[in-house]
Amino acid sequence: MKSFDKSKSKKTIIAAVISGVIAGFISSVHHWYGAIAYDTPWRAGVTYWIAGSVLVVYSLLFVYWKNLDNVVGKISIWLFLFSAVIFQAGFVIFECVYSHVLKNILFFSGAPESVLAKLYPSPTYHLPDNLFFEITGNLQLIGFVAVWYGYRVFKYRPES
C-alpha cells in the first residue's frame, strides 16, 4: 500500500491545471483564428465549448483539492479522470494528431491529392496553406501534457 503525499498531490494538481489551461488556450486561439481565416463560424463556437470544458474540468480539480480525503473528493477525482484524461486524450488524438499532425505529414511527404481529399474533405478541413493555423493546430499536442498530469493527479490520490 502506497503512502499518500499531500504535497506531491497538490503540486501535481497545479501542474495539471496550468497545462490544461494552456492546452485550452492554444486550442481556442487555433479555432478562433480558423473561424476568421477560413470563414467557418462553427469553429468560433468550438472556442466557447473548449473554454467551458476547461472551466468545468478544472473546477472538479478545485473541488478535489478542497476534499482530498472524503467522498466529495473521490467523486470529483473520478469525474476529472473521465473528463480530463479520457475525453481530452480523445480530443487531442482526433483534433491534433489526425487533423493536423497526420495531415501535414501526408501533405508534405507528397501523398496523392485524391487520398488527402478523401481523408480531409473540404470545407471541414483545409490542406496546409496557413502557417499560423497549422502551427497552432500542431501545438495542441500540449494537451497530452495535460493528460499526463491529469493521470498523475489520479495516480497520487489517497488510497481507500
Image (tube, rainbow, N blue to C red):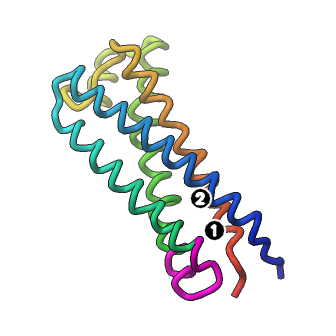
> Which residue has dot 1 on it?
154
Residue name at image x 36 percent, y 31 percent: 30
Left or right for 84, reference 44: right
**Horizontal and vertical percent position of residue 16:** 59, 54
Left or right for 159, reference 50: right
Separation of disc 2 and disc 1 at Cα?
6 Å
Tag on residue 87?
Answer: none
> Which residue has dot 2 on it?
150
Quadrant in which the C terminus appears:
bottom right
Instruction: Tell me where residue 28 sits by quadrant.
Output: top left
Q: Main secondary structure of the magenta part?
A: helix
Please check the rendered image and state whether residue 23 is part of the magenta-colored stretch, yes or no: no
- Residue type highlighted by circle 1: Phe
Residue name at image x 37 percent, y 56 percent: 53
Instruction: Tell me where residue 155 sits by quadrant.
Output: bottom right
Which SS class for mark 2? helix
Residue name at image x 21 percent, y 22 percent: 38
Quadrant in which the N terminus appears:
bottom right
**Horizontal and vertical percent position of residue 66:** 57, 75
- Residue interval drawn in magenta: 65-77
* The one of 121 and 66 positioned closer to us in this rendering: 66
Residue name at image x 47 percent, y 68 percent: 60
Left or right for 82, reference 67: left
Task: Check whether the beta carbons of the residues at disc 2 and disc 1 lie within 8 A of each other.
Answer: yes
Q: Is residue 57 above or below residue 49?
A: below
Q: Is residue 60 above or below residue 17?
A: below
* The one of 72 and 112 positioned closer to us in this rendering: 72
- Residue type highlighted by circle 2: Gly
Which SS class for mark 1? helix
